[in-house]
Amino acid sequence: MNRSALWILMTAIAGASSQAFADVRLSDSASALFDNSGGRSLDDDATFSGGNWWDVSAGGGETRSRSPVGTLDGTSKRAAFDLAGDDVGLRVYYKRWDATPLSNRTIGTRLSWSHAGLTLSGIAEARDFDVDYSPNEGTGARGSAHFAGNGFGGGIKYARAQWTLGAEGIWYHFGSLSRYTESQSDSASAPAAPASPLPVLPIISGPLTQVLPGLLPSVVSVAPSLTRSVVTLDQGALEHIVNAELARDFNKTSFHLNWTNARDAVLATTINNYSASLKQVFGDHLSASLTGGVSDSIYGSTTFGGLSLELTF
């Protein structure tokens, strides 16, 4: 009797394992995005999916953004893990972006609930930044400033009769960033003091020329280049970022309209991106997307376009 029970248990485990293995799928997505200022991003991401309840993904890429003050080259790495039930989903993710003189890291989670076409989600993120600078010009010495913050937000999406309408936003607070701006504000009219371990960032309401000399080259080469280009917009220290999307499915074709609004926390710059994309599915293994749009900010308007290919095995 015990042997029969053990045999049944082993058979059930083997069957479940075989089914789980059979349900595992692999997909790879390669994408490229360009703007008319010379900015670009090249990315590749791989995803393992098990049935309809878990996903593991990882990827990386490189970016280049340009503005009248300089060019910023960076590399990105990211990973995510998703769990999905009948009505509830959980996503945990990590992102890192490295450039000179700025790097950032993001750890986040998203919890969602769906019912009758309506999906509500909550988002929480922890972000930290390192800025490389020269405390004393002419000495060759280098320093690194660190500031961190948290972001909280949410989203809502409703799908009905092949139409999808959604919006989400995240609002950030960088506690240590205010120390830099307050220090600069207090000393703006006073003689320059010896550089402190934490460099002073620009006054939010003042001109960029009021930055302490040691950090000026770093800030000037980073902030405008980040916010002007859509390829690096989300790499900066943002007060908020809000997205809204309208989509329509036509069997194997879908059309998307998207609006993104963001505000830079360092230079108080507001950015608006407007884009449209078309996705086409070819058979069971290949899909392609074309994207085009315009980005508008105090630095001017730029147009951008991109292509994405996804192969599923």
Image (cartoon, rainbow, N blue to C red):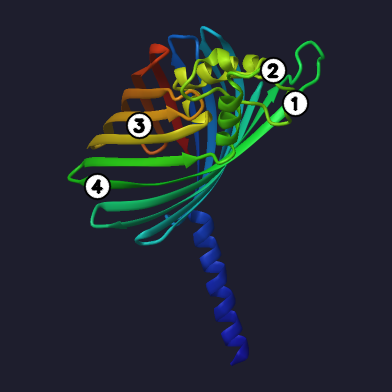
- Residue 54: x and y, percent? 48, 54
Mark 3 residue type: Phe
Q: Which residue occupies the foreground of this view, 94 or 179?
A: 179
Report, in whole angstroms, how far the alpha carbon at label 4 lies from the one at label 1: 48 Å
As helix, strand or loop, the secondary structure at mark 2 comes to loop
Tags 2 and 1 in contact by the CB under 8 Å rule? yes
**Which residue is identified by label 2?**
214
- Furthest-top residue in this view: 68
Tags 2 and 3 in contact by the CB under 8 Å rule? no
User: Which residue is drawn at the image coordinates 73% and 31% (left, top)?
Assistant: 197
Report, in whole angstroms, how far the alpha carbon at label 4 lies from the one at label 2: 50 Å
- Image disc number at residue 158: 4
- Residue 196: quadrant of the picture: top right
**Which residue is identified by label 3?**
282
Q: Which residue occupies the foreground of this view, 3 or 44?
A: 44
User: Which residue is drawn at the image coordinates 50% and 10% (left, top)?
Assistant: 38
User: Which residue is drawn at the image coordinates 36% and 35% (left, top)?
Assistant: 242
Estimate how packed mark 1 is, as few (under 14), some (14 to 19) or many (20 or more) residues with alpha carbons within 10 Å.
some
